[in-house]
Amino acid sequence: MLTILGHAVSINVRKVLWTCAELDLEYTLDAWGGTSRSTSSPSFLALNPNATVPVLRDGDLVLWESNTICRYLAARYGDGALLPTAPGPRAQVEQWMDWQATDLNSAWRYAFMHLVRRNPAFSDAAAAEASAQEWNRRMTILDGQLAHTGAYVAGAEFSLADIVIGLSVNRWLLSPIARPELAAVAAYHERLLQRPGYAAHGANGLP
């Protein structure tokens, strides 16, 4: 039995939960972070010195970093559908996963922390507006890719790239910013809504 340490409000935990849903994997969600047990406790830090969720325990194996956990689950328990085994197709999926974790996340962080989380460390309204504009620019890049594939982020088939980016699309749609109309992103979101895993863990009203 897999154990996932985290809480279901976290966008990064939800990546892992959605991956488990796609792979039909059973797991136990052990509540840490948020309003649950502190990730700064010594027992948690022994598993992840970064004090962040999620953490995966699979037997003696302990992993942290949500995209890495998703890759592991797909490689260990999948049939190659979510994460191809051929080097080229796999690299295309992982390229977009890395883009989500670096370029896209970096773009939205200030705006989200200012407008949604109301974090006092992100109180500069001008910086938040600049962040929102960069967020929209990155989403326009995604729109172009989706218009090119006509289906999913890395091509014609659903993959791990869609799990990590689909949650980012959900965050973009729910955040209180001015957004351009991106037709390919809108159509993509409708496709994701047909997946039970996204309905349960992605489009659940949590930004």
Image (spheres, helix red, strand yellow):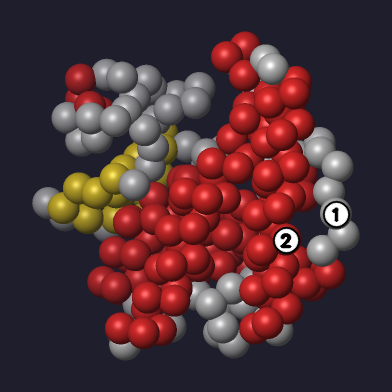
Q: Nearer the viewer, residue 121 or 195?
A: 121
Q: Amino acid at mark 2?
A: Thr
Q: Amino acid at mark 1?
A: Pro
* Residue where numbered disc 2 is placed: 140
Residue sitting at 60 percent across and 42 percent down? 107
Tell me if label 2 and label 1 are in contact, CB under 8 Å.
yes
Q: Which of the labelled discs sits on residue 180, or is there none?
A: 1
Residue 202 seen in this snapshot:
no
Query: Can you give x and y, in whole percent of width and height, for residue 205 in the image?
Result: 73, 45
Q: How many marks?
A: 2
Mark nearer the N terminus (2 vs 1): 2
In the rendered structure, the answer to whether residue 37 lies left or right of residue 75 reads right
Residue sitting at 26 percent across and 71 percent down? 76
Query: Can you give x and y, in whole percent of width and height, for residue 167 in the image?
Result: 60, 54
Residue 13 seen in this snapshot:
yes
Query: Can you give x and y, in whole percent of width and height, for residue 138 in the image?
Result: 65, 54
Residue sitting at 76 percent across and 31 percent down? 129
